[in-house]
Amino acid sequence: MTNIQSQKYEYLADDPNVKTMPIMLSLIIGAFFAVLNETLLNIALTTLMKEFDVTLPTVQWMATGFMLMMGIVIPISAILVQWFSTRQLFIGVMTIFTIGTMISAIAPNFTMLIAGRFMQAIGTGLLMPIIFNVFLLLYPPQRRGKIMGIVGLVFMFAPAIGPTLSGVIVEYLGWRYLFITVIPFALFSIVFASKYLVNVGEITKPKIDILSIVFSSIGFGTIIFGFSSAGESNEGFLSPTVYTTIIIGVISIALFSWRQLKLKNPMMDLRVFQYPMYTHAVLMFLIIIMAMFASELILPIFMQGPLALTAAAAGLVLLPGSILNGAMSPFMGHLFDKFGPRVLMIPATFVLSGTMFMMSRLTADTPVWVIIIGYILLMLSVSAIMMPAQTNGLNQLPKALYPHGTAVMTTLQPVAGAIGVSVFISIMNARQLHFLQNASNPENPVTINQAMVAGVELVYFIAFAIALIAVIMSFMVYRSSAKETDTTNSTE
């Protein structure tokens, strides 16, 4: 198949003889259903507890384990894209994902279900950086905003509709159809890619450093496990299991980072942080992930608590914002191509901050329409910040660092997700406990609701403070351009 280096055009999208649309469709179809699985099972956990007679901490491994496996395999993606062709990688990764989906669909016990779920996570984790890397090589910087906006539609919209979609499937078809309905689309993606996907990039087969893989796997794996366990444990961060694994993770990541800076061909080249707009993009990305988790996690709890909504109703309240987020992502990408990042990010960070402050004023008497409007504003601001920031940051990297830049960003997503969940849950629980300890009648349902309102208020006020940092950072952004510099001048 054709490689990009063999063309007289620097980017395949500039070659009139190359049809990029089938390439995009090959990747997007597979990506949508792979990423959808991140949240597709969340609403079915109660059903699975009854089905397999397991406890809540055990069944939560369906979600926690998914993030854990993604955190372990994503750093390896930067090496894999240099060892295998685009076709080989995509078809191989989608095959792993499809086999995992099939195993989960027929699983007779919880152990097999977890095994299938972990295979899904491996496929999803490797697929995300591959897609980002391919689109960076396909399209020149001045056209990437719109393209990355389309990618954003997949990566933001798919997990957002997961809970709503899974609620309908579980209620009317049963939990196994959460996997069965995905299988034909995954198979179609493999067949479609076999026919239309061309190879993008150059196979250089750099030396694989086993020690880097060990440090990376232990580091990111234990960090995600530790923070996820903190959110599930009654002791929170004071649990020996939690702080021990987090300490091990921090030490391993420090060793991993030191190792990468010493290697001539690092597994994950941390020199990407030499580029200011890339570093800026990573920080903005982390802030947005934290703000999103504050809402996607806390709002459903709040709505099913003090507002007394059903799980289905709570999911529907969040649906308009999720749909608009996905729909507006390509439009925001187009605006980025035309006007650059500042025009989008400055007003969007102000909207984000205002929304977080508004959410910090929620009470048990807040009308549902206020939450709907608030969540819409949140998701619109996210669409105007996240993909423009990521695209602008990646645009500043030379081509040799594309695999590493995408690997770093996608690795941080499950890490930030795990940290966001545990930190916000711990903050809310601590505030609720403090409120109840000082209440005259802590077992009264009204008092319990007031305690939750107090917890939600504190979480969103902290999210508001974090959003203010994004406001300040938005004034520091500028349109970046690639700098083809030598980044491999270190010694072994």
Image (tube, rainbow, N blue to C red):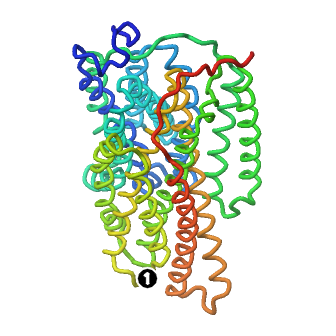
Whether residue 128 sits left or right of residue 68 in the image: it is: left
| Position in image of residue 479 (x %, y %) | 45, 41
Kindly identify the amino acid type of the residue bearing the numbered disc 1: Ala
Whether residue 409 sits left or right of residue 137 in the image: it is: right
Closer to us: 107 or 468:
468
Q: Quadrant of residue 337?
A: top left
Relative vertical location of residue 260 with respect to residue 114 in this rendering, above or below: above
Closer to us: 218 or 178:
218
Residue, far bottom: 440
The residue singled out by tag 1 in the image is 364
> Badge 1 local density, few (<14 within 10 Å), some, or many (20+)?
some
The residue depicted at 67 percent of the width and 87 percent of the height is 438
The residue depicted at 57 percent of the width and 50 percent of the height is 418
| Position in image of residue 320 (x %, y %) | 28, 60
| Position in image of residue 400 (x %, y %) | 53, 20
Callout 1 secondary element: loop
Relative vertical location of residue 66 with respect to residue 485 in this rendering, above or below: below
The residue depicted at 63 percent of the width and 34 percent of the height is 274
Query: Can the viewer see residue 142 in this picture?
Result: yes
The residue depicted at 34 percent of the width and 14 percent of the height is 9
